[in-house]
Image (cartoon, rainbow, N blue to C red):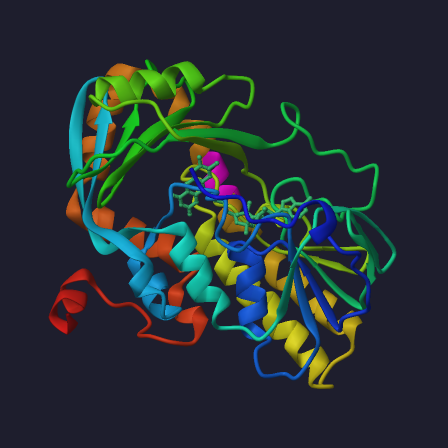
Amino acid sequence: MPQRRTKRGAARTPLGGDPDVLICGASFAGLAVARELAGTGADVLMLDRYEIGERQTSACGIPTEWLRALGLEAAARQEFGELVVHTAHGTSKFELPWTFSTFDYRSLCERLNDQNDASFETAKVHGRTGDTVHTDRGDLRSPLIVDALGWRRVLATPGGDHQPPDAPLSRGLEVHPGGAGDEMAIWIDRRYVPAGYGWSFPARDELRIGIGSFNPRFHVKDTTVALAEDLGSEAVRYQGNWIPHKLRDATEDGVFFVGDSAGHCLPLTAEGIRTAFYFGIACGRELRRVLDGHQPRSAALRRYHRFSAEHEWKFEWMLRTQRLVPRIPPRLLGPVIRGVAAPGFVRWSFDHYLDIAHPAFAGAGPSRRTRAAGRLAA
Ligand SMILES: Cc1cc2nc3c(=O)[nH]c(=O)nc-3n(C[C@H](O)[C@H](O)[C@H](O)COP(=O)(O)OP(=O)(O)OC[C@H]3O[C@@H](n4cnc5c(N)ncnc54)[C@H](O)[C@@H]3O)c2cc1C
């Protein structure tokens, strides 16, 4: 069990002030924003209700190249060059043009946090009035506020309710039994979920086995247990959350939204870590230009909003595919998956998929290193 270190009782001193930048949320998105602000000399404050890296928020699978681009390779647990896709009518193997890795959440967050010079405080964020953010430890004011708090979009203007099961949110739940495996596998199988998929991501000495349902009304607990049992694993150490599958406005009422709070998680695959990095970097770069005196806040809001919105058509395509796959009759799904597993198609589709939020954007590392080239370099 992770040890909860968040300050409680008397240790929870009042918090106030007016930092130059206030980043609410210190997971993937918030830490990526803070990284871009390193060296500006600005007073940057990050808030989270938990200590950095304390609460794992996902299965922690990511294109390996993103770990390299951010200098976070040391957090990697296991690397996969193949994706195994199980359906009720057969199994296909996708030879990937680049690799995926699982990583350790705490280690990655701590290493990413080492790359900024922001201050950090644990506080629960309740909401906002104008440029004042209300927390359980007091109010803070800032001209540059970032909401990296996840799908709830806590700092949105009140009234725009975005709650499951009516909002465009998927439901994800996983268990983390001890164990080892060689295959990164997914199950597109209606025995587990009518619209969605199951997964098993090995991470050296543990497995991350879960179910994601595109339909928020479908409860995934029983089938998560069923998949774990089918794989001979125990259903222990649960973690789950809602997963946005629709892009939202990346700015609102003077606030910058990044990661799940802006719906930056990719539909169909529910990959939201690299997109949180990608849009976090984009947001951080705009804020940096404000801090350096190169643009006013209004320009940063406009430019970041436009940058995010330019990706909308890609998110829409992913969403269309998310809606299409569950409509394919099960007996046709096996042959369809075998068809799209053809090496040429896999390379083309996965390269385009990576391009949606490419690691080269991080400004470090090569632009598109193939798996073979990666091996050569190793
Ligand atoms: C079961 C599951 C498995 C997943 N697996 C993967 C995967 O393998 N790969 C992938 O790319 N994506 C995966 N995702 C999606 C991914 O987890 C999210 O898209 C990603 O975490 C978004 O990052 P974020 O920084 O925007 O938000 P989060 O990671 O949710 O971080 C939000 C932060 O805000 C803090 N916070 C929230 N509310 C408050 C508050 N009121 N006050 C103070 N702090 C607060 C939280 O403590 C947290 O640190 C998975 C999701 C689920 C549910």
Please tell me which residue lies in front, 236 or 11: 11
Report the predominant secondary structure element of the magenta stretch: helix
Work out whether 235 lies above or below 21.
above
> Magenta stretch containing residue 48, yes or no?
no
Q: In the rendered image, which quarter is residue 14 located in? A: bottom right
Furthest toward the front, the residue is 10
Depth check, front residue: 16 or 305: 16
Picture coordinates of residue 147, whole percent (x, y): 68, 54
Residue 103 percent across, percent down from the top left: 33, 52
Residue at the (35%, 18%) spot, across then down: 225
Highlighted magenta segment, given as a residue range = 316-320
Q: Determine the image quadrant of residue 357.
A: bottom left
Residue occupying the point 38% across, 76% down: 364
Question: Residue at coordinates 57% horizontally, 75% vertically from top-left?
Answer: 117
Task: Pick whichever, 340 or 92, lies toward us.
Answer: 92
Q: How many marks?
A: 0
Q: Residue furthest right?
A: 130
Q: Can residue 65 be seen in this view?
A: no
Q: Residue at x 43, y 35 (%)?
A: 321
